[in-house]
Amino acid sequence: MVIEEKNLTSGLEDYLEAIYVAHLNNKPLKGAQLARELNVSRASVSEALARLVSKKLINYNSYEAISITKTGITEAQKVYNKHHILELFFEKVLEINKKEASENACKIEHIISENIINKISNFTEIYLKEQNSSDD
């Protein structure tokens, strides 16, 4: 099976991740809300949504809430998981506060390789198990 490369920029990944989080929380999301959430202009949102529609990652028209496609969910999960792994590592291992951890995870999630994210994930898992066993 050939997997089509979606070629998402870090900006488009941010939009897709925000749409995915709204989907997970079962909250309808419109373009204006997305603009406020990401602190960008409505014009930027419109352009980004059009690009995500052309890549078949979302369904959108200006009169309805944005919906994410199955392919969009798959792509968004990759970004979301990287963010979560990095945030957990920063908070639990490096003891960075949640806000700073989340902000930095958001920046790094776009450029980090699968190899490194897997190693960070494995390290964090081992570290947390050791911390929990030493608490007993």
Image (cartoon, rainbow, N blue to C red):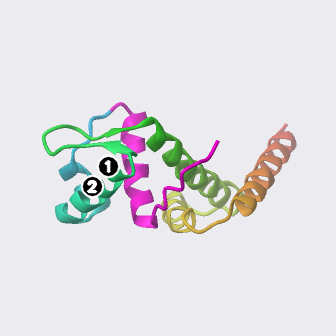
- Of residues 22 and 55, the one nearer the viewer is 55
Q: Distance of mark 2 from mark 1, alpha carbons?
A: 5 Å
Residue at 18% across, 37% down: 64
Q: Give the range drawn in magenta.
A: 1-26
- Of residues 58 and 4, the one nearer the viewer is 4
- Residue labelled with disc 1: 53
Residue at 28% across, 54% down: 49
Q: Is residue 95 visible?
A: yes
Residue 108 in the image, given as x and y percentages of width and height:
57, 67
Residue at 64% across, 61% down: 90
- Quadrant housing the N terminus: top right
In the image, residue 127 sits, relative to residue 115, either above or below, namely above
Q: In this view, does 89 lie to the left or right of 24?
A: right
- Circle 1 — which element? helix
In the image, residue 118 sits, relative to residue 44, either above or below, namely above
State yes or no: residue 49 in magenta: no
Q: Can residue 37 be seen in this view?
A: no
Which three-letter amino acid code belongs to the residue tagged 1? Val
Which three-letter amino acid code belongs to the residue tagged 2? Ala
- Residue labelled with disc 2: 50
- Of residues 71 and 123, the one nearer the viewer is 71
Q: In this view, does 89 lie to the left or right of 59?
A: right
Residue at 68% across, 64% down: 113
